[in-house]
């Protein structure tokens, strides 16, 4: 095997020219590290501190890279403002209250659109997943509509609904409703038929099966669908605020771009990202709280 | 008494159809323990599901106490091989499931559930969730759940199949003990010869697909049955006879008839 002790540059009869030897040595070290260290085995768990640490390091590294690129003048501030400039812009918006107003306006629109999609989509999805008739009627047409981009609807929406809040909320709805419903349908369909069968042998009939088996089994998946849908709803924000907006984070971003205030644009994007992340974490926490019985494999 | 008359079942998958059961008939006396033994794919699970009313037979009929079976019901309780506890319910609520549907008041339900949990040796686990239980424990709760509902007949489809060999032996002892205490009519499907003999009053040996009854072997071992029985002379004799019958079918089912020797008669 490999003998690292051999001086560099010396030709060995058994191991060949120096270059090959180094490759063999490195490969040996690499493979031993990979297989010996359990952190590199697929699906092997790592301590939570390591997970958190690595996650935070990614952010820190990004911040360092950003700082490096901007403070050294490598990239002019016209293209990429420095962290300081972004923070200053943010503080300015906080001071004059515009950040709060814009955030509130956006949250209002996204939440309303999302709520509508959820309130209609969840029952419809459950119906589609529980009864084949429901699936037959709705799934093809919804499958068709889900591929239509919400932004393409904007000209129609302007004519139908105007340019006020309703139009913006409608964009959010179009962007989320079909996906949400189809996902809820999938969750409901995937309830184990063994569970349903066994409930029949315990005396359950139609309504019981639905209320006591299908619904409880589906809630975790439905909550997860809501978490994902809210994420998508949030990404439609900018598209929704393209038309006739006078407030909102998307509006603020576009206005700032018009005046080449790149720092403000970045504040907008970061705030959107932060809000999305907070909502996501909240949903996850709620999930863990409500469903302590969930195994990793699902129902 | 359960009467299965000339049940046959053909499954149609796309444009192919295959015969799972061919004119199978059985009789189950009230209070008896019937073992249904057969190689994989012989249709024994299908037969059980037909009795449960979860599958419709292509032809033939099942009668329970003279009543024609047309669908599932609480009179025929069932335990599957897979773990079918409702994961969102505690052990206690799982066992009470059938009782709750029937509208039995809470106090009574709890008492019945506790009684059966004690019978299966899980007293104290009332508030546990299925995710916290081992496979063996989950199956015990599943059995308690089915029994608590007081069915006329209990159908068990290889309930210990997913458990390791040692747990399985202990579960068999638990089951035969439970049977002594409740004297429930049980149809027990298995591919394990030892299990079929140890538990049953009679063993129905089924052929490979398409399945039908090949032989009916009464088991005259003394009751109650203890684990020592498994190494007794009379048990070995029964095992030898039944093994001979089933081996031929297993070879057919696995397609290894030409590779391995046929049983010596």
Image (cartoon, rainbow, N blue to C red):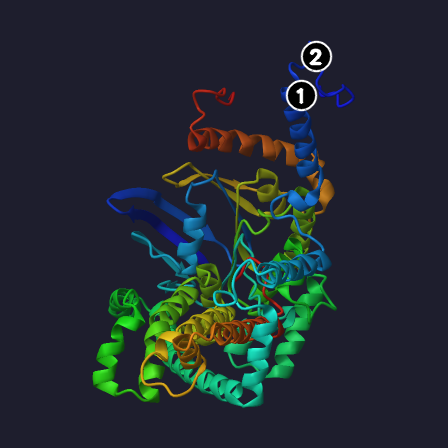
Say whether residue B7 is visible. Answer: yes
Instruction: Check the image and report above or below for A87 versus B37.
Output: below
Q: Residues within 10 Å of mark 1 (few under 14, many from 20)?
A: many
Report the number of numbered marks. 2
Looking at the image, which residue sits at the far top?
A13
Where residue A12 is drawn, which disc sits there?
2
Q: Which mark is residue B38?
A: none
Q: What element carries label 1?
A: helix
Judge from the rendering whether residue A145 lies leftward or rightward of residue A37; answer left or right.
left
Q: Which chain carries label 1?
A: A
Residue visible at 27% across and 67% down in the picture:
A148
| Residue at numbered disc 1 | A21
For marks 2 and 1, give the CA distance.
9 Å
Most distant residue in the right direction: A5
> Label 2: chain?
A
**Residue drawn 51% across the image and 23% down it:** B263
Pinpoint residue A267: horizontal percent, then vertical percent.
Answer: 52, 75
> Residue A109 or A214: which is nearer the viewer?
A109
- Left or right relative to B151: residue B199: right
Residue B139 position (above or below residue A9): below
Asked whether the residues under the numbered discs 2 and 1 touch, taking CB atoms below 8 Å apart as contact, a structural biologist would say: yes
Percent position of residue B173, x then y: 68, 50
């Amino acid at each position: 095997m490999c003998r690292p002790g051999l001086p560099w540059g010396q030709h060995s009869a058994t191991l060949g020219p120096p270059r090959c030897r180094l490759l063999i040595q490195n490969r040996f070290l690499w493979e031993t590290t990979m297989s010996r260290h359990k952190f590199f085995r697929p699906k092997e768990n790592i301590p939570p501190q390591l997970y958190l640490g690595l996650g935070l390091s990614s952010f820190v590294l990004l911040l360092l890279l950003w700082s490096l690129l901007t403070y050294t003048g490598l990239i002019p501030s016209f293209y990429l403002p420095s962290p300081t400039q972004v923070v200053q812009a943010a503080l300015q918006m906080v001071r004059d209250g515009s950040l709060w107003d814009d955030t509130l306006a956006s949250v209002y629109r996204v939440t309303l659109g999302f709520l509508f999609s959820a309130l209609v989509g969840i029952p419809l999805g459950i119906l589609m997943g529980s009864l084949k008739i429901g699936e037959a009627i709705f799934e093809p047409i919804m499958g068709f509509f889900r591929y239509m981009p919400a932004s393409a609807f904007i000209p129609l929406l302007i004519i139908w609904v105007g340019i006020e809040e309703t139009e913006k909320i409608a964009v959010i709805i179009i962007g989320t409703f079909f996906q949400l419903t189809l996902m809820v349908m999938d969750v409901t369909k995937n309830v184990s038929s063994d569970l349903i069968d066994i409930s029949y042998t315990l005396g359950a009939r139609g309504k019981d099966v639905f209320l006591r088996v299908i619904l409880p089994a589906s809630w975790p998946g439905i909550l997860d669908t809501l978490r994902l849908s809210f994420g998508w709803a949030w990404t439609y924000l900018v598209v929704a605020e393209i038309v006739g907006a006078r407030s909102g984070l998307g509006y603020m971003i576009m206005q700032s771009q018009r005046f080449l205030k790149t720092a403000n644009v970045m504040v907008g994007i970061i705030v959107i990202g932060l809000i999305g992340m907070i909502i996501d974490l909240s949903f996850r926490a709620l999930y863990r709280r409500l469903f302590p019985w969930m195994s990793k494999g699902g129902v | 008494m359960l009467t299965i008359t000339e049940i046959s079942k053909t499954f149609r998958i796309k444009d192919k159809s295959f015969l799972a059961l061919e004119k199978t008939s059985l009789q189950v006396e009230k209070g008896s323990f019937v073992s249904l033994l057969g190689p994989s794919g012989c249709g024994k699970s299908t037969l059980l599901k037909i009795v449960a009313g979860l599958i419709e037979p292509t032809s033939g009929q099942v009668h329970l106490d003279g009543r024609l079976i047309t669908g599932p019901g609480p009179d025929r309780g069932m335990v599957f091989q897979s773990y079918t506890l409702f994961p969102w319910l505690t052990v206690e609520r799982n066992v009470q499931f059938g009782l709750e549907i029937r509208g039995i008041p809470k106090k009574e339900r709890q008492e019945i559930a506790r009684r059966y949990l004690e019978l299966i040796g899980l007293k104290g686990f009332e508030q546990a969730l299925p995710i916290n239980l081992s496979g063996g424990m989950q199956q015990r709760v599943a059995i308690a759940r089915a029994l608590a509902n007081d069915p006329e007949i209990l159908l068990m489809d290889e309930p210990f199949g997913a458990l390791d060999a040692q747990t399985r032996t202990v579960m068999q002892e638990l089951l035969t003990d439970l049977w002594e205490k409740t004297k429930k009519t049980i149809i027990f499907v298995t591919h394990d010869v030892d299990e079929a003999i140890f538990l049953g009053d009679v063993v129905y040996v089924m052929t490979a697909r398409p399945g039908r009854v090949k032989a009916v072997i009464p088991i005259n071992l003394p009751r109650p049955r203890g684990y020592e029985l498994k190494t007794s002379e009379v048990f070995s004799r029964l095992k030898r006879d039944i093994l001979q019958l089933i081996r031929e079918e297993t070879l057919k089912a696995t397609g290894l008839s030409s590779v391995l020797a046929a049983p010596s008669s």
